[in-house]
Image: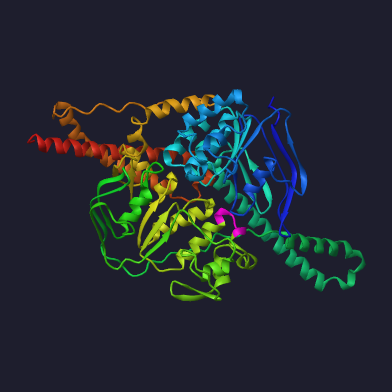
Amino acid sequence: MAPSPLLTLSDISLTFGGAPLFEGVSLSAGPGDRLCLVGRNGSGKSTLMKIAAGLVLPDSGTRFVQPGAKIAYLPQAPDFSGFETLGAYVAADLPEEESYKAEAAMEGLRIDGARETSGASGGEKRRAALARMIAGEPDFMLLDEPTNHLDISAISWLESELSATRTGYALISHDRAFLEKLTRATLWLDRGVMRRQERGFAEFEAWRDKTWEEEDQSRHKLDRFLKAEGRWAVEGISARRKRNQGRLRRLQELRGERRAQVLRKGPAAMALEAGPISGKKLVEAEEISKSFGERVLIREFSAIIQRGDRVAFAGPNGAGKTTLLKTLTGELAPDSGKIKLGTNIVAARLDQDRTLDPTISLWETLTGDPLLGAKGSNDQILVRGTPRHVVGYLKEFLFDERQARGPVGALSGGERARLLLAAIMARESNLLILDEPTNDLDLETLDLLQELLADYEGSVLLVSHDRAFLDAVATSVVWLDGAGGATEYAGGWTDMLAQGGGIAASAEADKPAARTLQKAGSKAGFKPAAAPAPAAAPATRKLNYAQTRRLELLPGEMEKLAREIVKLEEFMGNPALYAKDPGAFAKATAGLTERRAALEAAEEEWLELEALKEELGG
């Protein structure tokens, strides 16, 4: 027998600005549920979660919480007003005799309880909000963008803890890898209607596309029927007026039904065009170092960035990713070493702060200079050299005229991100500098941005904690370890891990922190994450019989793996495969990942053996 729901919403409706945000929404959540809530920016996901948390009252409908059940809510922007320190905030919901739970949670999440809230970073505040939730030992958790402001190490830790917890949760996130790993059921909020599928996010897109295809077919049939009935009404009604009044009424009802259908919006019509061609060598850094006070952020880093490269910078919060980005682009001078910038560089920048004046309209923001905070008043905007009416351009980014004349302060986080992307994409550029570009974007806009960056003929330098985004976009990843070291790895996030970089390289140094994380996790029913496997012992530096034999066999193995990869890529290239046979698609994906990793390992082994052979003189 299934356990009783802890939280139930029944027939919830809410209206904003005269238009319904959602109508008749119902959902239930029970112990152990792992739900994701997905939908476009502005669809009402965060508002619905606030209703579930009891923070917003709906226009109609009911909210029921099982007596004695504790529902905890993690907001996108936690309110720290009234709390001088992070420790006071974490312990706010606990009686004094249970303050040890707050201490354990802060120890686990590496939070300085004495840190003043006024000077805390976004990542520190996010960890404090998570610690407060964990210390409270809830029965069900509502998590709104829990990975925002967290670095990849913290995201990986949170992912492990949520994988192991017995506590149920519902989460909103733009992090595709996070959602795919953690969820078992999907709530889809689309044009005011809630749908539920008892499968995790990994199968959401196939479900969404099938739903939309069926919707299109149904609308097409209705349009054809209305056309036929309309012809009958004009041509055949006069001789049979009385007996066909019912058919006429039905025709009017169908027309009303068709008018009432809410057409879905297509994807934003974003476009990126590279401006004039830059020099072949974009940036040359020679042993650059940068410190702030006594803290060394970058130590003797060297790199050459060529035209067309898409270089990502990753690492713990505070490791110096943004500092390195600004140093490489000439915004900051290195303390030592040399930076040489290429010729004819035309850059466009998206900073992670995304500071916009909330009091002026989208119209005034876009016709001015939102990146500099300047206000405009023109009707037109230059889009890559061509004059465009500002409202028409905003519509391409899914804003309507009402929003265009409304204040920026009324926009959601994702809508603000789209507005800044509209400003950047109006400019010609050959270098994009993107600091956390994925924050707050809905998944469809994120997918489109990935495609645009992959096809962009200019160069891209970006900072991101989104692992799936790094895999899709980056040609190389620079990992900053937080102690001044910076190492570049070819490929995306997964490629870097396969080469022993990133979190894997830092695991040994982080063992003391990992032990304290277990203490915090145990307080809310969390289980400690498994310790990383020890690194393999280095190979003996001698070309013995086994090494000689491997050197002979490896070329054949690599050739075989390469052929298998080509076959699998061709097999998965069929766009109908996923919908037709999800099992086969999943099996092929796993096989492709396994063979790519095996090929990379074989190539690395072959290179090492060849180098050793040359070193030993054959």
Q: How is the image coloured?
A: rainbow
Question: On screen, 243 above or below 518?
Answer: below
Question: On screen, 181 above or below 351?
Answer: above
Look at the magenta stretch and give its main secondary structure: helix
Where is the C terminus found, in terms of image quarters? top left
Q: Is residue 157 left or right of residue 79?
A: left
Q: Is residue 29 left or right of residue 351?
A: right
Give the residue drawn at x 57%, y 66%: 362
| Front in this rendered view, residue 163 or 486 | 486
Question: On screen, 213 above or below 50?
Answer: below
Give the x, y percent position of residue 250.
83, 60
Where is the N terminus found, in terms of image quarters? top right
- Tell me if I can see residue 474 in this picture: no
Give the residue drawn at x 44%, y 51%: 436
Give the x, y percent position of residue 17.
71, 59
Q: Quadrant of residue 199?
A: top right
| Front in this rendered view, residue 40 or 51 | 51
What range of the chain is rendered magenta? 409-414
